[in-house]
Structures are given as C-alpha cells and as structure tokens.
Amino acid sequence: MNTCFVIMQIGNPELDEVYYKTIKSAIESCGLEAKRIDEDKKGDLITPNILNNIEESQIIIGDITNERQNCYFEIGYAMGLGKKTNLILTVQEDYKIHFDLMNFPLVRWNKDNLCEKLIKEIKARQSELNKTIRISSNPWDENWIASNREKAMLGLRATGQSGFMEIRFALDHPKININQKSLKEAANVSIINYWGHPIGDSISENPQSTVDGIIANLTKENTLYEYLTIRTNGDFYLLQSFFEDSQEPNKLLSDISIERVTKTLYYCTRLYKNLGVDSETYVNISILHDGLRNRVLDARTQNKFAQGTCNVEEPHEKTLHKTFTELESNILFYVKEITSSLFMLFDFATVPDENYENIVTKFLSIQIT
C-alpha cells in the first residue's frame, strides 16, 4: 500500500488527538497508509528514518501549527526533492504562519472541517500525480536492462553455456519505492524451490546492496548460472542458464520448459505480494529464450509428446501485461500462451493440453500446500 507521511508537532495533546481521530482517518479513506515518525517500530535512527519516509511516501502532509523548527526542515527537504505536488501543507485556522510560506497553498482547518478538506486535497494530489505519471507510458528502463544484460552475459559465458532464459518484470506507473533491506527480505521468501533450477536462488547466497536496489549472481557445478537484480522501484531482471545444459546439452526439454515458465509467473506474483503490491496492480512481464538454434526439443518423461529441431537464430520473446489477480487466476492459460509459440520453432512441435494441465497443476498443488 502507498503511504502518506505526516509531519507535525508530536507530544502536543491537542494535535495528537487531531492526528489519531481525524488526519489518520482521512488518509486511510483515500487508500493510503498513515505514517508518523513516533509510530515507527523499526528502532532505526530517527533522522534517517524521517528522510526515508519523505522520500518513499506518495503523499506528505506537513502541518505547521505551532511552527516547529524540525517541521520546517522536513518540509524543506520534501520541497528540495521536487515533491511539491506530493506535499500538502496544513495549519490551524487563524494561526499566523512564517512569511516564507505565505504564497504556498495551505489547507486551513478546524476540528470540524479538517477531515473533509484533507480527503478532498489528498484525492486531488493523487489525481495530479497519476496524470504526470501517465506521460511516461513505457515501463521499461532500456538502459538499465541493457547494462544488466551485458553483465549477466559475461557470467553466463564464463560457464561455457549459450542457452538461457531472460526474465523481466516492471510495474505500471506509479512505481513503488522499497528500500534495499526490504527487497532482500521479500526476494528471500519468494524463492521457488522446485525440481530443476530454482528461481531466485542466487539471492540467498550472495546478495549485495547497490545504489538503487540489490544484485546477486550464482554459479553451481560450473553449468548452472543465475544473475538477478531488483531495483527499489520494483524493476526486476533475471538471466538464468538452461537447466538442461547441466544434464543433456543441446536439448530443450518441453516439460522442463513448461515448469520453468510456470515457476516464473508464480514467482512474479509471490515476489510482489511480499513487497506489499496490491493485487490489482498491472505488471509487465517479458520472458525471452535464447541460444535455441540446433537444439533438439525432447522431454524428461518417456512420453515424448513433442519433438523437433530449432533452426531459428533469433531469440523467442513473449510479453504480458496483466494484473496480479489475472495472472494468478489464469496461470495455466498464460503458460501455454508463452511456451506453445516457443515449441513451434522446433519443427512445429505441439504439446497436448492435458500435459500442460498435469504439469502446471502438479506444480501449483505443491506450492500452495
């Protein structure tokens, strides 16, 4: 849930009552989580924590009643970040304010009208922010993707492998803002441990903090490779070698491929749920397979339901733009949509519907129980 951080005098009985009975209620009615620094239970240093809350919150309310110096500092910090649209200044009616803010829009309140005025102002700011965000419709940061792809490919080549799956996730605007520690914790509990190559396993081995997120890479048995990075805004990139190359080089196993894409979509819903993203949020998903040329499509089971050879040089990429609710409810459909066109590259190979259903249902039954 997006947050609204409240800057105000703390410890004043009258204003504390206004916060708990009115301000907090108005914020929550707008679909936001209300935060005030004295409610924080993390035990971190107060000043850095205040600044983090100002940086991360969608809406900031700054009440300047009684003109506390720390309040002016925090309001100034928000303005310095360019968050004027996010910032709502309030003051009790008939209270004289500092001349520096005379020309800044103010919500002048009394106990009877504050709730109504705040709700109206918060919704107006949310609408304005959404208009600004929609100007940039492309969710992908192509420079960030290219930079990480280059690093990941260096690691993959060091293992001697050429085949890989590349996964990218990006939330629609407005993006989230999650600190590195929370990213690591969410990624750790989202790892998909299932037969074959786990999704997100590298984060449990050697995660590192970066300026704008976390990064990890892992090599096992000189053949299994994974490179993963997540940004504080929720952008996700993963490159992973084909599990088949550790056992049957030059093959692509259809049942493994179906499991791999199923794990990917399930991991996506799990990761963002653990990051606190609303289930009705839209996510952009790209799943790319490369290093396919001259590979033989086969299956792990004795039932060789799809076979063929790939003569295509180009990578195979499929994209989705769905809410997390849609993704969870129709995972079988999307797995088939992604993998059926992949298998077509192998001499028009097809997989029976019952095989899709058996593989996906088996995976989900293990994960959910």
Image: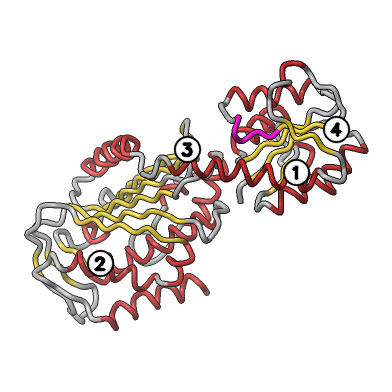
Say which amino acid is labelled 1: Lys
Distance, label 1 to label 4, CA atoms, is 13 Å
Say which amino acid is labelled 2: Thr
Ranked by sequence position, the earlier of labels 1 and 4 is 4
Labelled disc at residue 339:
2
Identify which residue is drawn at 86% across, 42% down.
18
Labelled disc at residue 117:
1
Local secondary structure at mark 2: helix
Say which amino acid is labelled 4: Glu
Q: Position of residue 10 (x, y in %)?
A: 84, 33
Tell me where residue 287 sits by quadrant.
bottom left
Distance, label 1 to label 2, CA atoms, is 52 Å
Ranked by sequence position, the earlier of labels 1 and 3 is 1
Q: Is residue 250 left or right of residue 144?
A: left
Distance, label 1 to label 3, CA atoms, is 37 Å
Local secondary structure at mark 4: loop
Distance, label 3 to label 4, CA atoms, is 43 Å
Q: Which residues are magenta?
A: 84-88
Ranked by sequence position, the earlier of labels 4 and 2 is 4
- What is the chief secondary structure element of the magenta stretch? loop
Relative vertical location of residue 355 with respect to residue 311 in this rendering, above or below: below
Foreground disc of the pair 1, 3? 1
Q: Residue furthest right?
A: 13
Badge 3 local density, few (<14 within 10 Å), some, or many (20+)?
many
Provide the residue designation for mark 3.
213
Relative vertical location of residue 309 with respect to residue 10 in this rendering, above or below: below
Distance, label 4 to label 2, CA atoms, is 63 Å
Relative vertical location of residue 368 with respect to residue 12 in this rendering, above or below: below
